[in-house]
Every structure is written in structure tokens, then in C-alpha cells.
Amino acid sequence: MKEHYRTFAGYNAWANRRLYGAAAQLSDADYRADRGAFFKSMHGTLNHLLATDRIWMKRFTGEGEAPDRLDTILHEHFDALRAAREAEDHRIVGWVQSLDEARLTGVIRYRRVSTPEEFVQELMPALDHWFNHQTHHRGQAHMILTSLGKAAPELDMLYYQREIAAGRAT
């Protein structure tokens, strides 16, 4: 199972780089425009993804800053957000690579952002949720790009897997 999660961590970083590359082409007005996504704009969606990744990494590792709101704007400026995203992706890949089978079969304890109740959950289903959540919101960001008439990058995992097989994934 360890390789399964390593693949998802690598895919996550790859997809984020591609998405940020496309988002970097937007004007500031388009980047901030409410396009009807759950977190309204590309700006809100990308900030949400970083915020929730930090929340989950705090749950998983006990380390790092974790916002107390799901709609937190961590970075007002795109370049700072992009740099923080790259650093968080590096952190995620490193942490996932450090996992062993014993840790993967363990549990985590955490509190939700919105309620004080504590949850105990097996780590692997939590990781499944986390990687799926990232894909879900990247899909919304993809929709934002297409609704603006912009070119949206291919984000399917099959493309990542093909690039890995060909030695081209970055």
C-alpha cells in the first residue's frame, strides 16, 4: 500500500504544478472572479486546497500551521500562494515517503475544523479521502479555467502515470 500513496502524493504535486501553471496565465480580475465554484474563484479554491492540506498534515503529523477556517485566505498574492503550494507539496511527498506499512495500518485522532468532537479514524481511509478531496477541488479549478475560455491542463491520473512510465513526469 505504501507505493499506492506514494503515487498519489506524486500525482498531487504534478497536478498542482500543472494547475498553477494555467492559473498563472489568468488576469488578476479573472483569477479573483466569482465563477460559481464552492469557494467562488480560482483564488478562493486554490487557497482552500492549501488550507485543507495544512489542516490534514497537522492531523497526520502533529506539525505545522493549520487554519481554523476552510475558507481561509492564506495568501492574497498568487506568487506567494504558488510558493507555499510548492513547499506544501514537497512536505506531503516527503511525509508520505516516510510512511511504513505499520504506520499505514494505524489510526489518527483529530477534531474537525467546524466542531469540537474528536474522531478516531484509520489512516488509510483518511489518506484516501484527502487525496480525493484534492482532486475534487482541482476539478472545480479546471471548471473555472474552462468557464473563462482558457486552456485547462490535462489532470487525469492516467496522464501522470504515462509520464512516469516514459520518465517525463516533473
Image: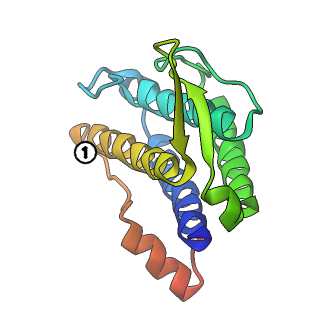
Above or below 49: residue 159: below
Q: Secondary structure at mark 1?
A: helix
Above or below 56: residue 15: below
Residue located 42% across and 36% down the image? 26
> Can residue 33 be seen here?
yes
Q: Amino acid at mark 1?
A: Thr
- Residue 54 in the image, given as x and y percentages of width and height: 63, 33
Q: Is residue 66 left or right of residue 149?
A: right
- Residue 37 in the image, given as x and y percentages of width and height: 28, 28
Crowding near the residue tagged with mark 1, few <14, some 14–19, many ≥20 C-alpha atoms within 10 Å:
few
Above or below 44: residue 50: below
Residue located 57% across and 79% down the image? 168
Q: Is residue 119 left or right of residue 143?
A: right
Q: Which residue occupies the foreground of this view, 93 or 112?
A: 112
Q: Quadrant of residue 103?
A: bottom right
- Residue 161 in the image, given as x and y percentages of width and height: 46, 76
Q: Which residue is mark 1?
A: 146
Q: Which residue occupies the foreground of this view, 132 or 128?
A: 128
Residue located 32% across and 22% down the image? 40
- Residue 159 in the image, given as x and y percentages of width and height: 40, 73
Q: Quadrant of the C terminus?
A: bottom right
Q: Which residue occupies the foreground of this view, 158 or 102?
A: 102
> Can residue 78 be seen here?
no
Above or below 37: residue 148: below
Task: Return the residue found at the far bottom.
Answer: 166
